[in-house]
Image: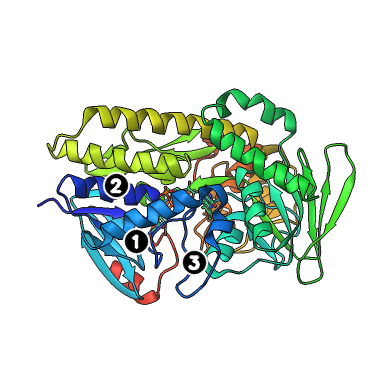
Amino acid sequence: MTRIVIVGAGPAGINAAETLLAHGRQPILLDEGRQAGGQGYRKPSPGLRLDMNALMGSEASKYQALHERFESLRGQIDYRPGTLVWGIDGKTLHLQQDGRATTLDYDALVIATGAMDRIAPMPGWTLPGVFGLGGAQVALKDQGCFIGRRVAFLGSSPLLALAARQYRALGAEVVVIADTTPFVRKLAALPALLNSPRTLLRGLAYLGGAMRAGVPVLHGVTPLAVAGDGHVESLLIRDAKGRERRFACDAVALGYGLKPETQLAELAGAQLAYDEAFRLWLPQADADGRAGDGLYLAGDGMTIGGADAAEASGALAAHALLADLGIPSDAAAVAALRRRASRLRAFQRGLSQAFAWPVAQIRALPDDVTLCRCEKVSLGEIRQAMAQELGPTEVNRVKAMTRCGMGRCQGRICGPALQEIVAGVGNIAGAEAGRLRMQAPIKPVALAAAKAGAS
Ligand SMILES: Cc1cc2nc3c(=O)[nH]c(=O)nc-3n(C[C@H](O)[C@H](O)[C@H](O)COP(=O)(O)OP(=O)(O)OC[C@H]3O[C@@H](n4cnc5c(N)ncnc54)[C@H](O)[C@@H]3O)c2cc1C
């Protein structure tokens, strides 16, 4: 029997598992988290009583439905929570489960590893109290904690207004929602955003709710600094009219949209290509998620599409896998899933224009700003390395010379900004700057696990 492994128990992975099971296949479902649901539909830790209806708002019914479907599945599949996949060799996965190293061979692999925050550095972003926007949501949903009592939301992402609503719903004070993309760019993205009018209206409702509650909602801001003595005390920005404004706060949630977690796809042999709209390297797959021999991709880990697209693409990847095993599936259902995934992804492309990655802002950052937190490398060190005679103009060479991206996060946080700095200093296109090549372990693992994997 073909051994099918799915990595990621978010909406994409759960839908893939459900589809496979409906066609008589029992996959192994791995997730490093203790509970299924993924990022957006993350469940609170056991024993924590959080008002998930207040937290999830209009998404509460979808949250509920996914978890109910998962509960009816879990006894019928081989679900292994708390299992990190940290490397792939051929068709063998390297795992860390409860601190123990182990391996798992597969015949077919569905990678549904989701996404993470995309961060642009700024002066003061390494102060305690600055969190990734998604991290601020994880603290709230998973542990019932605010990142602070008075929180500033800064960056450019539809999740800014959403996370601010979640914080307000549970009693935190939101001091500002400051978006770096000018309002006119949001208007220009409207045609693409009309691919999902309901989601668009929901986003507008979040912003309207914040404004009615007296929260300043600003567009086209320039971040100047997070200031404080040992911890966050204020956020300084320049608004669209050129005025400097300071917001007293004790925490900042910082985020510029999401970036797919592509590491495992790359190790499993998927090709990556530069996407000019997202300014990210994305794994290549056909419309159903086929990315290589026995390799299927789904959800935000393939391309950012949101939770509904993740559900559709998870089912599509499973149908593709079944078709490759010679198991027929419902052609009309597959066609409907393709249309749905494609429409929702077009919407996300609109979002990438309405909430733009701030290229010019990153390139204008002063030399003393830290770019790589793990290895403490400043922007000035990158610029100096590149300015040398025959200095590097490609991110992996810059990494080798400066150690930027060589630490615990393996460039998952600093990588996108490094790419923009290298492209800017080298005066080359984003694609020419290259991408940090992935290598195992893709996330920090216990030494015992890494040693066992190497032997
Ligand atoms: C931090 C964060 C918060 C978000 N909050 C919201 C929100 O509130 N509302 C909203 O609409 N959207 C939110 N989004 C976006 C939304 O989560 C996604 O669109 C949707 O969840 C994508 O589903 P997915 O199945 O592709 O991935 P995910 O839901 O991200 O699931 C991926 C799963 O893969 C697992 N995984 C990843 N790597 C490994 C590995 N190496 N080994 C084992 N397991 C692994 C993860 O633990 C996770 O459970 C958020 C995204 C992020 C990153």
**427 displayed left or right of 221:** left
Q: Secondary structure at mark 1?
A: strand
Q: Amino acid at mark 2?
A: Ala
Q: Position of residue 323 (x, y in %)?
A: 18, 36
Examine the rendering and report whether any part of residue 10 can be seen: no
Q: Quick one: 416 or 142, which is closer to the camera?
A: 142
Q: Give the spatial CA distance, label 2 vs label 1.
A: 18 Å
Q: Position of residue 139 (x, y in %)?
A: 58, 65
Q: Position of residue 408 (x, y in %)?
A: 51, 65
- Residue 180 location, quadrant: top right
Q: Give the spatial CA distance, label 3 vs label 2.
A: 23 Å
Q: Position of residue 411 (x, y in %)?
A: 53, 55
Which numbered tag is attached to residue 16?
2
Which numbered tag is attached to residue 265?
none
Q: Residue at x 74, y 34 (%)?
A: 182
Of labels 1 and 3, earlier in sequence is 3
- Give the mark toward the camera: 3 or 2: 3
Residue annotated with mark 3: 44
Which numbered tag is attached to residue 85?
1
